[in-house]
Every structure is written in structure tokens, then in C-alpha cells.
Image: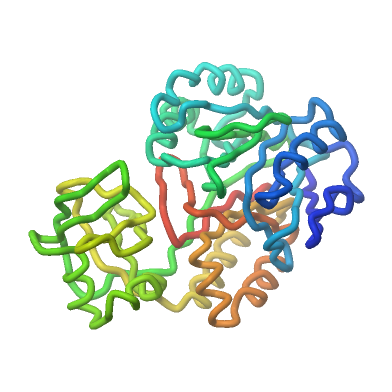
Amino acid sequence: MKQFFGMSQRGSLEEALQGLHQPQFIMLLSNDTQFEEHVKALEKRYPGVPSIGCIGMCYQTGVVEHGVGVIAFCDGITAAANVLEQASTMPVKYIQRLEKDMRTVGGSSRDTVCIDFCSGNDACVLTTIYTALKRQGISLVGGTGDQGKVSANGRIYQDAVAYALVRNQNGRIKTYKENIYHQMGDYRFIASNTDRANYILGSLNGQSAKQVYKSILHVTDEEILTRTFQNPFGKINGDDTCIISIKEVNGNALACFRQVNDSDVLILLELGDYRAITKETIRQICADFPRRSAIFSVNCLFRYKLFSEHNYMQEYLREMAALGSHAGFVGYGEHYNNRFVNQSMTCVVFE
């Protein structure tokens, strides 16, 4: 298979589509003012080609912040795209769409992946989708777009998740998740006074969550939002850690980008040697796939900000480009199978 990346910093879809011929699946990454216009134009240009889209930044060797980008697969893939609606209340109502698409595309854990763009309520959505995917061992990679809108096959939806099943006809696929954080000290917290609907973390070990965070790290209220780049929370999930970013201070509580529940066990994380960790991820991919057709990734907005502040973003994209055809988008949360994580990178590699 082959991966196409086209972009326009000025938001010209025509410019971004130059050189794209006979796509078999398309992803659209647009800006909030042109999204609807681009969705309609894309469907008109390539009618019937499975497509999903959202509002967000994208990248290949550089980042498109406010324009438009198109990532397309061709020459050897089978794909189906659709949407689960009512993401905030009852996405399971539409699960038969995914089950039907799975039968149409066929495939298995060896050669098929699900890519999704979500408008919100990610944890519930992922649990719903993965109940269907796990029966065939199909992995999922995706993320959250901006403005609560997604598109599928030329239509725009709110409160929904757009997904695509992509089968590699000529080789394997494998998904990866990269975590650049590790546990700080031996802090362990029991969460309480949470508001699941608004992602509020009220108390840690019976004390104000805000005050606990401030006391350990010796930061002010104003410094909390930037300090989360270095020290997010983590939720232990088996042998894995789900990263939880802080969104804002809410009185004596902390609003997060990921749901926290009463009695969740949390730890405090600290930033590791992200350059070395990136090199290890690349080494592992090369070991698993001596020949690579494409890599599609989702990087968290906070990773993008962190890397940019440390003048590492361009270097990072150059290193990933050495793997071959690499492209992706900047999400407001990352999806990996049934897990909704923050400040991470998830990707799928095509042989």
C-alpha cells in the first residue's frame, strides 16, 4: 500500500489534493472555519471513497496549524468508513454499523486496524467500539478532534465518532503507544469527590487535589497548567499507565482532560528522556517491520506544545520520516484499543 500526504497552509483543499489519484481511503484534517466546506468538496471530488475527518492540525515533515491536510491510502487496501452517533449518551445503539463493516472488510488482528476521530466522551465510545473489535483482535488508533465535529463519507456529525476499518492487502499491521513519562517518587493517591461528567478531580487521599499537587511540586495556581507538561497524573491500568493531563484549576479541584472516577488509584508522573524514548520506539518499529509502507500517528496537543517549546518538534518529525512515509494529526486525546490517554503518541505501522 501507499500513503499520500497533501497539505495547504492557506487552507486550499485543491492544493492539498494535488497528486492524489485513485485513493481507497481518505482522512481530512481541516480548520474550524473551512471544515464543512472541505468535507463537501472532498466528497464531490472523490464520491464513494470511504473518508473520515475532523478539525485539527496535521503533520508530515512540518506541521499544518490552520490550513488543511489530507492523508490517503491507496494501492492495496480495503476500507470502510462510518459513524457511531449519540457518543455522549448511547453510541452502542449504532454498533451494528461497525459489525457490518467488519464483515465487509474482513481481516484479522494481523492485517486490519480501526482508525477513529471522536468529538468527545472518548472513554465510553472506546469501550463501545472495542467490544466489537476485540472479538477479532483488531487494534484501534485514533484521537479527539476540535469543536465537537467529525465527518464520515461527506457528512458532518456532532456528538459522534467517525471510524474507518482499514485492511492491508499486502502485509501486516501493528499498533504502538509511546509514553515519555515515568513514575515520580512513590506517591499513590486515591481519587474522590470526582465529577465524571466534567472530568473533575476533587480530592486525593482526602485532601484538595489542587493543594496536593501544589505542595508536592511547589507551584502556584497559575503554574499548574504548564507544569502538567512535566508532571501529569497517571492511572495504573494493569501493566500500563494511562496519562491524565490537567486542563484547568476548578476552585480547590482540578479539571482534567480524561475522566477520573472515585476510588481510582493515581500516581504522579515526571517527564523522561523523550529523545531517547523516541529513538527506542523507532528502533522497535524497525525491528518489527524491516519493510514499511506507511506510518500513521496521533500526537497529543500537549506533546506538540512540549516538543515545540524545547525546539524538538521538527527534529522529531525528521526522525519519524526516516522510517518512511509518516503522517498524522495532533489530537486532544489519544486512543489506543480501549484506552483513552493524554500526552501520548499512538500509531499504526503498515508493512
Instruction: Report x, y in % for residue 226.
Output: 40, 74
Indicate the quadrant containing the N terminus: top left, top right, bottom left or bottom right. Answer: top right
| Quadrant of residue 315 within the rendered picture | bottom right
In this orientation, which residue lies closer to the viewer: 228 or 172?
228
In the depicted structure, whether residue 229 falls above or below residue 296: below
Q: How many marks?
A: 0
Percent from the top left, x then y, of residue 336? 47, 46
- Which residue appears at 67% of the width and 75% of the height? 314
Position in image of residue 24 (x %, y %) = 79, 34
- Kindly identify the residue that appears in the image at 88 percent across and 36 percent down: 22
In the rendered view, does 28 fall on the left or right side of 210? Answer: right
Q: Position of residue 234 (x, y in %)?
A: 30, 60
Q: How is the image coloured?
A: rainbow
Give the vertical position of 220 relative to 142 (above or below).
below
Q: Residue at coordinates 43% horizontally, 37% vertically from top-left?
A: 126
Viewer-nearest residue: 278 or 338: 338
Q: Tell me the residue at 58%/17% (across/down).
A: 100
Frontmost residue, 252 versus 16: 252
Quarter location, residue 109: top right
